[in-house]
Amino acid sequence: MLIDAATVREVDAPAPTLREPRVLDLESRAWLDGLQAAGAERDEAVARLRQLLLRAARFELGRRRGQLAQLRDPDVDDLAEQCADDACVAVLARLDDFRGASRFTTWAYKFALLETASEVRRLAWRGREVPLEPEAWEPLAGGSSPADDAEQRELLAVIRDAVATELTPHQRDVLVALAVNGVPIDVLAERLQTNRNALYKTLHDARRKLRAQLAERGLTP
Amino acid sequence: MTDDLLARLLGPAEPELDCDQCFELLDRYVDLELGGAPADAEVPGMRAHLAGCPACAEEHASLAALLS
């Protein structure tokens, strides 16, 4: 079950004893003041923000360098600059959304990490076919013992039947691509011209149907 | 290997956030985690979503690593 937006708003609200607006820590306040100022003060704050985001982009690219073997180091540097630029635009566009639920730097970093991680996944899959058929799951059906093996084969058999008979064609394509063939969700979103959240909701609905089929048969994963 | 496949096919059994909600709350969740606060109690549904969504799990791991 996905948690609905109303619940999230409640979750995100301050605790009952702290219903006043969140008090920003001094560093976060300074960031906001600078970015909401005018003229040279704002320019200086934006430049510092971009450096912060560039640090995060380089950090993320360093973690994922192995997925970008086709890129030369200067190209990776250019990619970091591009991701920092895109993240900077996103942060500035959403500045009013920052409510002090975290430190400002933590909030800003997540934009750079999202931009960079998504770009790495897209580049790693550039030119590759996105498989929508469940070719990969047959060889995976092997448990650690004969009992496990029989139990897991039964589960997989029910799941494969449910995939074929209970899911819509779109749910089937999304489930197989994401869960069986390991296609990254933002890569699939781009290929299907949709967005990550819509795909995750489709995946969630498909998973719920599979769980219901297992429950009907008294099976538990 | 089959356990992994089953986990990916079936996803988390618990109520979970979606990807947009996860992004909205990720910074708060990580600051709570790194501060030793009860992040899972403060942001219910996050842990389940991270178990069910590899992309969001990667971004969570990166943010936590960057700040550690």
Image: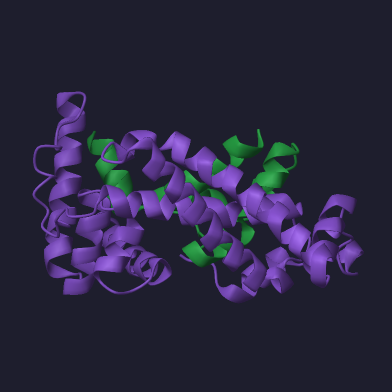
Q: Is residue B27 above or below residue A55?
A: below
Foreground residue, A48 or A154?
Answer: A48
Q: Is residue A141 left or right of residue A194?
A: left
Q: Residue at x 63, y 76 (%)?
A: A6
Q: Is residue A197 above or below residue A182?
A: below
Colour pattern: by chain
**Residue furthest to the top:** A145
Residue B2 in percent (x, y) is at 22, 37
Q: Quadrant of the C terminus of chain A?
A: top left
Colour seen for chain A: purple
Residue A116 in percent (x, y) is at 46, 51
Q: Residue at x 56, y 65 (%)?
A: B21
Q: Residue at x 27, y 45 (%)?
A: B6
Residue A175 visible in rendering: yes
Q: Is residue A103 above or below residue A202?
A: above
| Residue A44 lies in quadrant | bottom right
User: Who's green, chain-wise?
Assistant: B
| Residue A98 lies in quadrant | bottom right
Q: Is residue A28 above or below residue A140?
A: below
Q: Is residue A16 left or right of residue A189?
A: right
Q: Is residue B34 left or right of residue A135?
A: right
**Residue furthest to the front:** A40
